[in-house]
């Protein structure tokens, strides 16, 4: 019986047309300009026999006005030679959409031209450099936003950052749970139903807070209907970290933050050749903010003064840890002022983005802290403490 079955299977393979075995699925990502102030994200899926298109599907996500609502449609396209065309309705507003495209081979890749109609507006579109992809874009937010529900330690995620993944449209339930809590939202992720949300049917909201409050809020969010996962996120400044024993820095069973701030202030000040002006633990973030002052190294001839603001975080190296904590040198920013006697000049601050600010390397600062406080530094290549 097994032998007979193999003969039948082989016979069926012989009867199949040769083109069936040659069919392949490809994805292209053309950028079609639908007009001023519009944004699109388009993926076309094609099943081909060689260069011949057998069938196609377009996933079109668009925003037709600045800060407007995103919408999306997935439309099956009928292939007729080089032409692919079809119609459907959008996912949210039920807007009618028509697609009529012609594809041609170019010397370098592929090109599309044709028309796209959304509601009553028809736009001529063209894109002349389209390459093939064997896999579709993966729109799962898990692939671009880190979320560790139970991190082994804080070497790769931050104890300050929390991410909550929930079903699309459930943002108000999450926000209501966070109201009254000491959190700071990161609005660039999760508040808007963008292309990622429409395609994955999920949203991911991130926020920051003092690490001591994190576990309680994580537990609270996990109880909300529609929440799929809650965990730690963000970026760990592990390359600028020092590991210290908790027992050596404790007082009355708690981390002696007053003593720690004093020692960190002295160490950081010496490492950047500055004088410590003030230090304080910020309630909202849990960070230690050190303010330092030194004669400007860039503008020595002008006699200006540099004000340095160093932000450090000191927390247990993992959830529930009672043996070691870590000091991360988060950022060190600089402003320049005129503190000369008599009338003083106003000096504009450096632009944070694209400017030519004064850069302070955090690596030697972290090394100085480790040396002065008797700690260990992180080896990023071996991913272990030195």
Image (cartoon, helix red, strand yellow):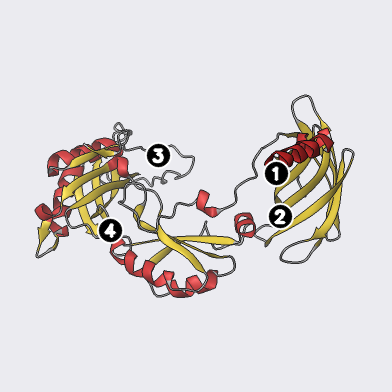
Circle 1 or circle 2, nearest the eye: 1
Sequence-earlier tag: 4 or 1? 1
Q: Quadrant of residue 273?
A: top left
Kindly report the distance in space between the C-alpha atoms of the residues bearing marks 1 and 2.
56 Å
Of all residues shown, which one is farthest toward the top?
107
Front position in the image: 153 or 211: 153
- Place of residue 378 in the rendered image (x, y in percent of width and height, measured from the top left): 26, 39
Q: Which residue is mark 3?
A: 357
Q: Are marks 4 and 1 in contact (CB under 8 Å)?
A: no
Which residue is denoted by mark 4 in the rendering? 319
Disc nearer the start of the sequence (1/3)? 1
Q: Is residue 21 left or right of residue 84?
A: left
Q: Nearer the viewer, mark 4 or mark 2?
A: 4
Residue indicated by mark 2 = 62
N-term-proximal mark, 2 vs 3: 2
Neighbourhood count class around disc 2 (C-alpha, 10 Å): few under 14, some 14–19, many 20 upward? many
Instruction: Confirm or deny contact between disc 2 and disc 3 (CB under 8 A).
Output: no
Comes first in the chain, label 1 or label 2: 1
Q: Nearer the viewer, residue 27 or 195?
A: 27
Neighbor class of circle 3 (other Cα within 10 Å; few <14, some 14-19, many 20+) is: some
Query: Upstream in the sequence, badge 4 or badge 3?
Result: 4
Q: CA distance from mark 4 to mark 2?
A: 42 Å
> Is residue 305 something one can see in this rendering?
no
């Amino acid at each position: 019986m097994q032998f007979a079955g193999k003969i039948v299977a082989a016979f069926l393979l012989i009867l199949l047309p040769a083109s069936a075995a040659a069919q392949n699925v490809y994805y292209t990502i053309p950028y079609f300009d639908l007009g001023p102030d519009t944004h699109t994200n388009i993926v076309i899926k094609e099943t081909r026999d060689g260069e011949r298109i057998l069938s196609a599907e377009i996933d079109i996500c668009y925003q037709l006005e600045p800060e407007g609502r995103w919408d999306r449609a997935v439309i099956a396209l009928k292939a007729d030679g080089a032409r692919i065309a079809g119609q459907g309705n959008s996912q949210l507003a039920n807007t009618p959409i028509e697609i009529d495209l012609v594809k041609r081979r170019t010397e370098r890749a592929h090109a599309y031209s044709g028309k796209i109609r959304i509601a009553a507006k028809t736009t001529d579109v063209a894109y002349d450099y389209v390459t093939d992809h064997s896999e579709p874009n993966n729109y799962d937010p898990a692939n671009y936003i880190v979320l560790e529900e139970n991190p082994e330690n804080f070497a790769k995620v931050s104890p300050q950052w929390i991410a909550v993944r929930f079903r699309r449209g459930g943002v108000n339930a999450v926000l209501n749970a966070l109201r009254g809590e000491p959190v700071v939202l990161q609005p660039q992720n999760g508040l808007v139903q963008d292309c990622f949300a429409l395609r994955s049917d999920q949203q991911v909201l991130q926020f920051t807070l003092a690490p001591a409050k994190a576990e309680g809020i994580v537990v609270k969010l996990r109880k909300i209907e529609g929440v799929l996962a809650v965990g730690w996120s963000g970026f760990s400044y592990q390359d600028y970290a020092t590991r210290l024993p908790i027992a050596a820095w404790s007082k009355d069973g708690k981390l002696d933050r007053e003593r720690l701030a004093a020692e960190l202030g002295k160490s950081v000040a010496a490492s950047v050749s500055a004088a410590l002006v003030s230090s304080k633990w910020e309630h909202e973030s849990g960070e230690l903010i050190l303010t330092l002052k030194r004669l400007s190294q860039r503008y020595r001839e002008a006699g200006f003064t540099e004000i340095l603001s160093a932000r450090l975080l000191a927390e247990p190296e993992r959830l529930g840890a009672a043996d070691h904590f870590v000091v991360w040198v988060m950022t060190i920013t600089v402003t320049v002022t005129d503190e000369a006697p008599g009338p003083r000049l106003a000096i504009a601050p450096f632009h944070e983005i694209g400017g030519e600010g004064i850069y302070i390397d955090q690596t030697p600062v972290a090394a100085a802290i480790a040396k002065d406080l008797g700690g260990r530094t992180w080896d990023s290549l071996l991913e272990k403490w030195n």
